[in-house]
Image (cartoon, rainbow, N blue to C red):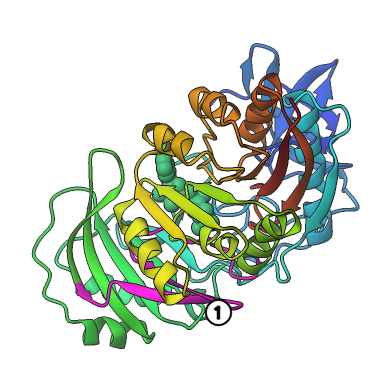
């Protein structure tokens, strides 16, 4: 039997990156999930680490004024969301506070200039893709901190056409000779759906036509693929049926996005992201722009309209193929793309000697060598750093500062409503 932890009363002061609330017991930090600032709660300690404790709510004594009723019946059990119990306006404000605190504490900026906060025009139905887990006939997301699948029949974060796809995927399961570990589903802004059926171990041959998949899912599925999780954890394609790409139209730009390429997940915010990044290129006259971690050219192509020449660097072969195609369909001849890890493309970047650099790395941020070498580019004037992790952003900003590059301002663009995830665009300028 699980031993009972110590119980005590705390008041939640604020939310921290990761989504938990922070309270204190005799000065010691206590982190509690699914609470809101202002909640007064009796908690039970679940683990004790050096310097802080983790705890769970046993009873509410007072409820925060920021609370609202979660829309989803699975909230609390399903690991997909963190903050449905907080009203959306407050979620965005708390994200702003977390960004500010990270920039102050880790980034060592006394008063960060958070120039703009851009909420998602809808906090629901915004995601164009999902990676759903499958276990013993259940389809859903992992429960928080576990590999148990929470069986769900809908998710209000997903685009309308795919928000209640789970029961249909269960129907599809019945026609598969062996159970996959994941379904990855992507629905473009035009409602074209790509499906990946992902296996993590051995599986039997699948005899399923595209027409049958389309019929079961009752969606405009343009293609589906069978994948196997490789040693690096990424799904490796075994076979694809139908078309393995779709298109996204964002304002005046069109992007081909293949099943294996990255595309921004919040369909209401991609245009705002493109606008805020390309505005930086438009406001000042830059000659040459480099876009590192460029994906399918989502930012390179719009920025390419305002500079003489541009280049993009991207590790995924699929994304680079899309980017090369995308520059053509958008009529831009002044852009080149390189399929390389950024770390291995630094000599190419130096040879270009760009005055504007855009970076949009994964959550781990930039590595030290990338920061150092970018800082040493002779012609460099500005870096636009798009980040999905305020801690690594702040860490990298502190390092850039050591090399004579300072943050002028930052914008928060809420890509991930109902979750603790924070997307920011930081504008850095060479000062020395
Ligand atoms: C956050 S996405 C940004 C993509 C693009 N800027 C956009 O807005 O769609 C990060 C991209 O970096 C790529 N990537 C990850 N690690 C990389 C690396 N070490 N070097 C180059 N690209 C990398 C991924 O394949 C992905 O396309």
Which stretch is magenta? 241-269
Question: Magenta stretch: residue 254 in it?
Answer: yes
Quadrant hosting residue 96: top right
**Residue that appears at 42% across and 58% down:** 131
Judge from the rendering whether residue 41 lies leftward or rightward of residue 432; answer left or right.
Answer: right
**Residue that appears at 43% across and 33% down:** 346
Q: Which residue is mark 1?
A: 160
Judge from the rendering whether residue 330 lies leftward or rightward of residue 24; answer left or right.
Answer: left
Give residue 332's position: percent from left, percent from top.
47, 69
Give residue 287's position: percent from left, percent from top.
60, 51
Relative to 281, is 248 above or below?
below
Q: Does dot 1 land on a helix, a strand or a loop? A: helix
Give residue 115's position: percent from left, percent from top.
84, 49
Relative to 167, is 392 above or below?
above
**Residue that appears at 20% across and 75% down:** 241
Judge whether residue 225 can be spotted in this image. yes
In terms of depth relative to the viewer, which is nearer, 127 or 410?
Answer: 410
Judge whether residue 164 can be spotted in this image. no
């Amino acid at each position: 039997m699980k031993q009972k932890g110590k119980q005590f009363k705390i008041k939640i002061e604020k939310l921290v990156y990761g989504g938990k609330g922070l309270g204190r017991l005799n000065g010691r930090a206590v982190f509690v999930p699914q609470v809101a600032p202002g909640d007064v709660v009796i908690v039970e300690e679940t683990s004790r680490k050096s310097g802080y404790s983790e705890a769970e709510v046993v009873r509410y004594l007072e409820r925060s004024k920021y609370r609202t009723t979660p829309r989803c019946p699975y909230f609390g059990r399903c690991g997909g969301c963190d903050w449905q119990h907080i009203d959306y306006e407050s979620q965005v404000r708390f994200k702003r506070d977390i960004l500010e605190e990270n920039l102050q504490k880790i980034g060592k900026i006394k008063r960060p200039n958070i120039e703009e906060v851009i909420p998602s025009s809808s906090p629901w139905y915004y995601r164009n893709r999902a990676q759903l887990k499958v276990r013993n006939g259940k389809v859903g997301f992992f429960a928080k901190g576990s590999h148990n699948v929470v069986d769900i029949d809908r998710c209000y974060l997903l685009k309308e056409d795919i928000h209640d796809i789970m029961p249909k995927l269960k129907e599809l399961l019945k026609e598969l000779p062996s159970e996959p570990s994941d379904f990855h589903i992507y629905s473009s802004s035009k409602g074209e759906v790509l499906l990946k059926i992902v296996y993590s171990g051995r599986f039997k041959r699948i005899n399923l036509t595209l027409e049958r998949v389309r019929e079961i899912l009752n969606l405009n599925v343009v293609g589906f693929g069978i994948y196997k999780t490789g040693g690096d954890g990424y799904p490796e394609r075994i076979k694809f049926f139908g078309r393995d790409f779709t298109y996204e139209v964002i304002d005046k730009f069109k992007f081909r996005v293949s099943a294996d390429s990255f595309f921004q997940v919040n369909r209401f915010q991609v245009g705002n992201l493109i606008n805020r990044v390309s505005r930086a290129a438009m406001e000042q006259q830059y000659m040459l722009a480099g876009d590192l971690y460029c994906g399918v050219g989502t930012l390179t192509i719009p920025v390419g309209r305002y500079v003489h020449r541009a280049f993009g660097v991207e590790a995924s072969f699929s994304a680079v193929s899309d980017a090369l195609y995308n520059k053509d369909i958008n009529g831009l001849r002044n852009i080149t793309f390189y399929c390389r890890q950024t770390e291995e493309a630094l000599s190419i970047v130096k040879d270009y000697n760009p005055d504007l650099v855009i970076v949009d790395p994964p959550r781990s941020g930039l590595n030290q060598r990338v920061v150092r070498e970018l800082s040493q580019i002779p012609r460099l004037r500005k870096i636009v750093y798009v980040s999905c992790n305020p801690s690594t952003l702040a860490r990298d900003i502190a390092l850039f500062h050591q090399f004579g590059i300072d943050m002028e301002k930052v914008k928060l663009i809420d890509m991930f409503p109902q979750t603790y995830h924070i997307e920011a665009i930081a504008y850095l300028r060479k000062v020395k």
